Amino acid sequence: THFNFDQLVNEIVEDIQLTAEKHQIQLKLKSLRDIHGDRERIQQVIVNLITNAVKYSPDANRIIVFTEDHGHEVQLCVQDFGIGLPPDKKDLVFEQFYRVSGTKEHTFPGLGLGLYISSEIVKQLGGRIWVNSIAGKGSTFCFAIPVVQALQTSTQENES
Ligand code: ATP
Ligand code: MG
C-alpha cells in the first residue's frame, strides 16, 4: 500500500486536537511525499509522540508538528514546551518500562511503553528515532523512516 505522509499526519492531529482542547497543535507539513509501507504502524508512532507532547506539557499550550523531505527518508518531529528531560535521561526513555518520575506539582500516568514500542517500530522500518530536550523548557522528539521501507519491500517481493 502507499499513502501520503503529510495527509496521515494531518488526520492524526485533527483527531488528537479534539481531545487536547487546552493545547494548540500547529502543523508545518513539508514532506510532500508518498510512503510505501505500513500505515498503521507509522500511525502508532506518530500518535505516541503527539500524545506524549500533550501529556508532558501541562502548563504550555503550544505543540508544533513538522515534517520534512530528506530524499530517501521522511522526517517527523514533535516539539513541545513542556517539562523536558534531564540530559542523562534522554536515551533511557526509549527503554521498556522506563519513566522519569513526576514532580511535586505533576504526576503523569503511564506504563513507560509508548516510546519503547515506537522505537521498535521505527527500527523495523529501517529508520531512527531520537530526542532533543532541555529540562524545564521542552522536548523535540523526531523520527526518520525510508520512503520505501525495507521490511515492506521484501514482503511485497514475496507476495508477487
Ligand atoms: P505510556 O506507555 O502510556 O506511553 P509513558 O508516556 O510514561 O506511558 P513513554 O511514552 O514510553 O511512556 O515515555 C517514557 C517516559 O519518557 C515518560 O514516562 C516521560 O518520563 C518521558 N517522556 C516521554 N515523552 C516526553 C515529553 N514529550 N516530554 C517530557 N518527557 C517525556
Ligand atoms: Mg507515552
Image (tube, rainbow, N blue to C red):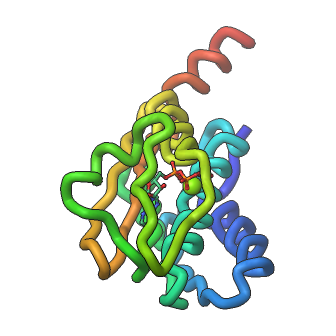
In which image quadrant can residue 12 be found?
bottom right
Image quadrant holding the N terminus, namely top right
> Position of 137 compared to 28: left or right?
left
Compare residues 61 and 102 and report the one nearer the observer.
102
Identify the residue shown where x is 70% and y is 80%: 20
Task: Return the residue found at the far top.
Answer: 158
Identify the residue shown where x is 42% and y is 58%: 101
> Position of 88 compared to 46: left or right?
left
Identify the residue shown where x is 68% and y is 66%: 7
Compare residues 3 and 47 and report the one nearer the observer.
47
Residue 98 x, y percent position in the rendering: 44, 43
In the rendered image, is residue 40 in sight?
A: yes
In which image quadrant can residue 87 be found?
bottom left
Residue 25 x, y percent position in the rendering: 59, 83
Identify the residue shown where x is 61% and y is 65%: 51
In the rendered image, is residue 34 in sight?
A: no
**Label tally:** 0
